[in-house]
Image (cartoon, helix red, strand yellow):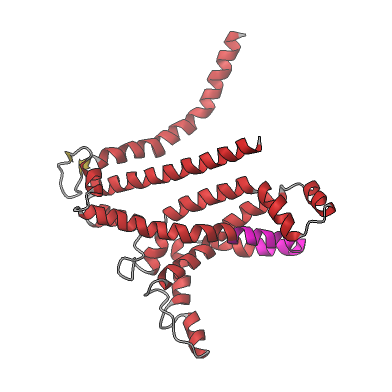
Amino acid sequence: MQRTSWKSKATSSLFVLPYLLLFTVFLIAPIVYGVWISMHDWDLLNPVKEFVGLKNYLNIFDSESYLHNLFFEGLKNTFLFVIFSVPLLVAVGLGLALLLNALPKKMTGLFRTAYFIPYSVSVSIVAIIWLWIFDTNSGLINQYLQKLGFSAIPWLTDIPWAWVSIIIATLWWTIGFNMVIFTNALNEVSEELYEAGSLDGANRWQTFIHITLPTIKPTMLFVTLTSTIASFNIYGQPYLMTRGGPGTSTQVLLMNIVEEGFNQRQLGNAAAMSILMAVIMIIISLVQFRLTREKKEAVK
């Protein structure tokens, strides 16, 4: 009996081994190597890589170091994008899912496809489309505005319009994913709950607030977390649409990390900035996990 159990465990381990190997090679090893680089004065043009310990991290928190402004200005711009984009990504995704559920069955496939197709294209295609729409001189929107007698809007060259343009492009690009997640969650809501609400005389708004929303709350927390993580990783939209401008007002943290690592060739500084960014992401994930656990305990 014991020999059978031992063989069973060994067989199970063999199935897990390839995934464990890939996880180690493509995730654990790069993280460890990144931490190692962050503790060195790692200039790509200098063959000597001097070990400096935590100096690169301390420079980020030293207000007199250029790394301080580079990191925290990029972090501030990234937070701005997260604060304004995540509520829209969650609310619009849920709204589209509710609209999809209210449509006749024969129209749902077309509706779902129309909103999910943008999610399948690359960020460069997204940027080209929205540059054509938002261009100040020859953009589609400004041409129509001028025909109606309105002034042209500096969509990509002034604040807050540059952020508005980036957020609209991001919504169009990614909202289909959240819509599909919410649609699946709405389909899981028990019809018996809706029937009970109807018997109690609840209208649509009361049904949504007291039945639908509490039931899909775990999914909403999941969508909020994934949208927050994705928004923190924003890079392509501001890089291709505004080049970080006007000035540095849309220059996000990932753009500054790439600038320091590959244009300035200071991989040690760039790695330290990346590790700190990862720590911030982990803290947000832990807060999200804590909120989710408290919700489950409250339900119990």
User: Could you say where residue 294 lies in the image, as x and y percent from the top left?
Assistant: 57, 38
Q: How many marks?
A: 0
The stretch drawn in magenta includes residue 7: no
User: Could you say where residue 152 lies in the image, as x and y percent from the top left?
Assistant: 44, 84
**131, above or below 237, in the image:** below
Image check: 58 left or right of 197?
A: left
Q: Identify which residue is drawn at 33% across, 71% down.
A: 246
Q: Residue 178's quadrant in the figure?
A: bottom right
User: Could you say where residue 288 lies in the image, as x and y percent from the top left?
Assistant: 51, 44
Q: Identify which residue is drawn at 82% across, 51% down.
A: 195
Whether residue 10 is visible here, answered yes or no, is yes
Residue 280 versus residue 5: which sits nearer the camera? 280
Residue 192 versus residue 118: which sits nearer the camera? 192
User: Could you say where residue 157 lies in the image, as x and y percent from the top left?
Assistant: 37, 75
The stretch drawn in magenta includes residue 103: yes
Spot the residue most to the right. 199
Which quadrant is home to the N terminus?
top right
Image check: 91 left or right of 279?
A: right
Image check: 276 left or right of 145?
A: left
| Residue extent of the magenta highlight | 92-112
**22, above or below 9, in the image:** below
Q: Residue 48's quadrant in the figure?
A: top left
Which quadrant is home to the C terminus?
top right
Q: Identify which residue is drawn at 21% across, 55% down.
A: 66
Residue 30 versus residue 104: which sits nearer the camera? 104
